[in-house]
Image (cartoon, coloured by chain):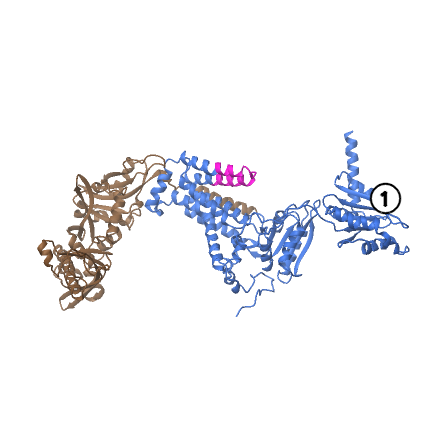
Chain colours: A blue, B brown
């Protein structure tokens, strides 16, 4: 029995697989049969057969997926027009063949703006899965897709992960169309290009590559397009899928793209000649090429007074180094280089460490791991119990561990400070890089002291130097040094002095504003 | 790829194999806040004041707060290492900011100690040096100096703090001391520390400075002479207070039999010493420009007129001259060039210095000098007159 079932299933599968690539037949019954096979067991598919016309009555079928399309629109502009307002069709000379009939329906009956002819069943399936309604006419080997896409989506909300005080508060949602609207709303130019590439064998996800023509280098666009179209994967569920396909070097912790939920940040990136990739169903826009110092830049820097922006940026660089090095330096100094500590500080450290049974490096690793656990737990927990766990974790575990003499209170201070410093880095993947690198440096510091830290930093630096993000050196403009751009990376220069875009190979349009006199 | 893997394995193993050979957890160490050096017969004695760290928070503080340990051996290094026979932790000598030299050692021969101080990297060049006068360094280290926990840190703070308050003693670091011992034309001094009995309580106090000549200590300056020494070097102290008998005189004070004392502050001074060579004769011309304020007065006459101020200034200058003179006389009496005159001559007249360098120790005592001090009053703290009684 099972054998027969499997056999039947295989036959059905085979049939569906071959059917999908076939062209639309001019026989409506054949089309209906085929679609019935294709849409078999799809409970949300709607297949409405009806007949319209008085003298030349024609059988036709309307296909759409419930929940993806605007039902009211389909009923008002499609069904109503065909069933009730067909008087107009009577004017069509009957000598015209069926294809022209569809043409005249498109031109004269349908009161919808987005209409498209389809020729294969695959196209039909793709359009109905995307929310369009498709009309198939008897005697006509083409289908008509009507743009009736409409589904429930999250309203535009404040980006949760990139909060700013000043600046726009809207963030991307899950619907690609709304996201493109948010970008085009800010860059009202036809130079803003939004090319769609469909990726995913099953998901057929719309992946949008956007850039500004004449600013983004041609070679960059071509390279990205090549890399994207080379992808053959069954589904693309988030823009994060694409990062590893775009990256030059995969075996590294250094992320070569940036993610953002903020349309203003995307626009800023596009205006500097970068490209942005939006994936339908994901609120995270992927920005490339990106350099490491850009992880320290927040969009807000550009919205407030340049002095404050610069100071905050310097603060962030300091926080980055603290997040990267502080526990390692602390461990190196208290285990190897006691002479570097002033006597009074040494006595304080000694009194907190008195009776702690672990070596400093083990203590630091334990606390850092605990911190990462708490962070991860806080991230995954339901909102209702999140605060409870943070309190238990931070207060009770921290305090009790110190009281019990397992860790020294100064180490708790160091780790907590480091944790806070790592969250100052605006880009989430930038802060992840920092936290991961910190462990490596900590182990090196525990083994070799300060020379170990220097070695680990050198290894890190060499790796960063060897990376390019789509042709841009990862550490630019710090290395190779570019003095003109450094002033917009380490600090934020005033807008009046910001006359040129950052240099990118192949960029021809570098002037951003005329020099004010 | 294979090369990369091999290379990274080599790299990682070099990290691991080198191990943590140099590592010393804080719990395995104990901080030496001050060390002392002395001799006893043929043996050298080393003392260390160890900071006993208070236990973790929430527990009662230990009593006592420190521990003084000592060891003796024919060499200081061996004595230091012998501490490990009784001490369960590794003493961190480099934590010390204070070193105390016993008077016995100083009077015997400073070379017993100087080599260790230069060769041993754990003895810092910036430790402050003191000489325990009449007692051993151990006695000094054993005294409690509240509110400080350790007498070692207390001494360091006392000598640095007093340069802006009482303004008498000059802090001398190990580096100063060794440089002065090695350089021709200058001899070292070290502040002396004594133990005073005060109402059954022992307390530490600075008292005079030990004067060295060559390899050993030969005497000391008293407090007044030390003030003179400080005046002979620009900015050796920040501020000081000195008292003069008021040059103005006061009928009322005489009637009341109240001493007529005027306290003056010295806030800044600049010293220039020029050697004048006249054939065989060398005269040191000392010019000091000083300024200061009137800070305390205990009679009732008017102060703030140009004439009275000039009188006060003259009297003050005279008093300062006496102090400087006292210091120079004592140095010449001890025959030790702690003033660095030899160095001053060698800078101004290198040729002459080459001729006299060998005979300088004998010559120093006979060098003539001329002191001119110009003390200027700057302010009277907004009080033109003194407190008026009804």
Residue A118, percent across and down? Answer: 79, 51
Instruction: Name the main secondary structure of what is drawn in magenta.
Output: helix
Q: Is residue B353 left or right of residue A406?
A: left
Q: Chain of mark 1?
A: A
Task: Give, as a single range, the part of the protein colored magenta.
Answer: A368-392
- Work out which quarter of the rendered image holds the N terminus of chain A and state it: top right
The percent coordinates of residue B96 (x first, y second) are 29, 45
Relative depth, front residue between B195 and A386: A386
Q: At x 57% / y 64%, what residue is drawn?
A: A512
Q: Position of residue B304 (x, y in %)?
A: 19, 63
Q: Nearer the viewer, residue B306 or A475?
A: B306
The one nearer the camera, A210 or B32, is A210
**Quadrant in which residue A330 is drawn:** top left
- What residue is shown at x 46% (from left), y 45% (from top)? A418
Left or right of residue A63, residue B377 in this image: left
Judge whether residue B186 can be spotted in this image. no
Kindly state the secondary structure of the residue where label 1 is placed: helix
For residue B201, which quarter of the picture?
Answer: top left
Query: Dot 1: within a 10 Å radius of its alpha carbon, few (fewer than 14), some, or many (20 or more) residues?
Result: some
Q: Is residue A271 visible?
A: yes
Q: Residue furthest top?
A: A1
The extreme front residue here reads: B390
Q: Which residue in the structure is indicated by mark 1?
A: A29
């Amino acid at each position: 029995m099972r054998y027969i079932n499997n056999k039947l299933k295989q036959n059905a599968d085979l049939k569906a697989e071959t059917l999908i690539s076939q062209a639309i037949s001019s026989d409506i019954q054949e089309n209906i049969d085929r679609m019935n096979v294709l849409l078999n067991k799809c409970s949300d598919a709607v297949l409405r057969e009806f007949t319209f016309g008085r003298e030349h009555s024609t059988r036709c079928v309307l296909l759409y997926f419930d929940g993806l399309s605007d039902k009211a629109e389909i009923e008002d502009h499609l069904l109503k027009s065909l069933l009730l307002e067909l008087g107009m069709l009577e004017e069509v000379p009957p000598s015209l063949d069926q294809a022209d009939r569809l043409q005249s329906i498109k031109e004269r009956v349908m009161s919808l703006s987005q209409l498209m002819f389809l020729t294969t069943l695959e196209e039909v399936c793709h359009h109905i899965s995307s929310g369009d309604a498709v009309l198939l006419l008897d005697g006509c080997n083409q289908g008509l897709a009507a743009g009736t896409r409409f589904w429930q989506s999250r309203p535009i909300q404040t980006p949760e992960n990139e909060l700013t005080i000043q600046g726009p508060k809207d963030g991307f949602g899950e619907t690609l169309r709304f996201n493109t609207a948010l970008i085009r709303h800010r860059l009202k130019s036809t130079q803003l290009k939004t090319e769609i590439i469909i990726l995913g064998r099953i998901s057929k996800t719309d992946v949008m590559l956007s850039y500004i023509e004449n600013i983004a280098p041609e070679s960059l666009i071509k390279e990205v397009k090549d890399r994207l179209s080379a992808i053959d994967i069954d589904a693309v569920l988030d823009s994060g899928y694409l990062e590893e396909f775009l990256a030059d070097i995969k075996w590294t912790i250094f992320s070569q793209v940036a993610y953002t939920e903020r349309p203003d940040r995307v626009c800023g990136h596009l205006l500097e000649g970068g490209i942005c990739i939006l994936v339908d169903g994901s609120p995270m826009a992927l920005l490339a090429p990106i350099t490491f110092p850009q992880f320290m830049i927040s969009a807000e820097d550009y919205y407030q007074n340049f002095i404050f922006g610069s100071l905050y940026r310097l603060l962030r660089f300091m926080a980055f180094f603290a997040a990267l090095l502080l526990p390692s330096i602390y461990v190196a100094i208290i285990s190897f280089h006691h002479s570097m500590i002033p006597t009074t500080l040494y006595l304080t450290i000694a009194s907190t460490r008195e009776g702690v049974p672990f070596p400093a490096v083990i203590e630091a690793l334990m606390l850092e791991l605990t911190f990462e656990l708490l962070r991860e737990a806080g991230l995954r927990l339901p909102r209702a119990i999140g605060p409870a766990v943070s309190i238990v974790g931070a207060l009770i575990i921290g305090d009790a561990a110190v009281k019990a003499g397992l860790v020294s209170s100064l180490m708790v201070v160091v780790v907590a400070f480091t944790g806070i410093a790592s969250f100052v880095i605006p880009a989430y993947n930038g802060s992840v890089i920092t936290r991961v690198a910190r462990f490596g440096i900590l182990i090196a510091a525990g083994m070799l002291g300060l020379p170990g830290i220097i070695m680990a930093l050198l290894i890190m630096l060499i790796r960063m130097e060897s990376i390019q993000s789509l042709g841009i050196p990862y550490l630019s403009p710090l290395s190779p040094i570019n003095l003109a751009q450094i002033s917009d990376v380490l600090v934020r220069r005033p807008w009046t002095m910001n006359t040129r875009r950052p240099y990118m190979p192949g960029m021809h349009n570098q002037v951003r504003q005329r020099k004010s006199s | 790829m294979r090369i990369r893997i091999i290379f990274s394995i080599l790299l990682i193993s070099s990290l691991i194999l080198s191990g943590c050979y140099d590592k010393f957890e804080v719990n395995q160490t104990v901080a030496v806040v001050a060390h002392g050096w002395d001799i006893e017969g043929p043996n050298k004695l080393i003392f260390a004041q160890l900071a006993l760290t208070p236990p973790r928070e929430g527990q009662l503080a230990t009593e006592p707060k420190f521990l003084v340990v000592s060891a003796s051996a024919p060499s200081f290094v061996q004595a230091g290492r012998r501490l490990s026979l009784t001490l369960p932790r590794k003493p961190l000598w480099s934590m010390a900011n204070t070193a105390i030299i016993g008077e016995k050692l100083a009077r015997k021969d400073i070379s017993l100690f100087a080599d260790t101080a230069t060769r041993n990297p754990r003895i810092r060049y910036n430790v402050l040096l003191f000489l325990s006068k009449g007692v051993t360094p151990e006695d000094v280290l054993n005294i409690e100096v509240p509110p400080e926990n350790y007498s070692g840190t207390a001494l360091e703070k006392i000598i640095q703090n007093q340069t802006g308050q009482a303004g008498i003693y000059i802090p001398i670091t190990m580096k100063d001391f060794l440089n002065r011992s090695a350089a021709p034309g200058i001899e070292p001094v070290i502040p002396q520390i004594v133990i005073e009995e005060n109402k059954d309580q022992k307390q530490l106090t600075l008292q005079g400075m030990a004067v060295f000549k060559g390899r050993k200590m030969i005497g000391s300056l008293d407090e007044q002479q030390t003030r003179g020494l400080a005046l002979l070097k620009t900015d050796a102290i920040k501020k000081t207070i000195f008292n003069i008998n008021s040059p103005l005189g006061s009928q009322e004070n005489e009637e009341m039999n109240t001493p007529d004392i005027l306290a003056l502050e010295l806030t800044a001074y600049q010293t220039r010493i020029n050697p004048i060579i006249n054939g065989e004769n060398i005269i040191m011309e000392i010019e000091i420009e000083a300024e200061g304020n009137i800070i305390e007065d205990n009679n009732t006459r008017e102060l703030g007129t140009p004439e009275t101020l000039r009188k006060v200034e003259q009297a003050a200058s005279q008093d300062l001259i006496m102090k400087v003179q006292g210091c120079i006389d004592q140095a010449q009496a001890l025959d030790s060039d702690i003033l660095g005159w030899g160095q001053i001559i060698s800078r101004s007249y290198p040729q002459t210095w080459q001729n006299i360098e060998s005979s300088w120790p004998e010559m120093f005592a006979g060098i003539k000098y001329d002191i001119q001090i110009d003390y200027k009053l700057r302010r009277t703290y907004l009080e033109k007159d003194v407190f008026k009684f009804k």
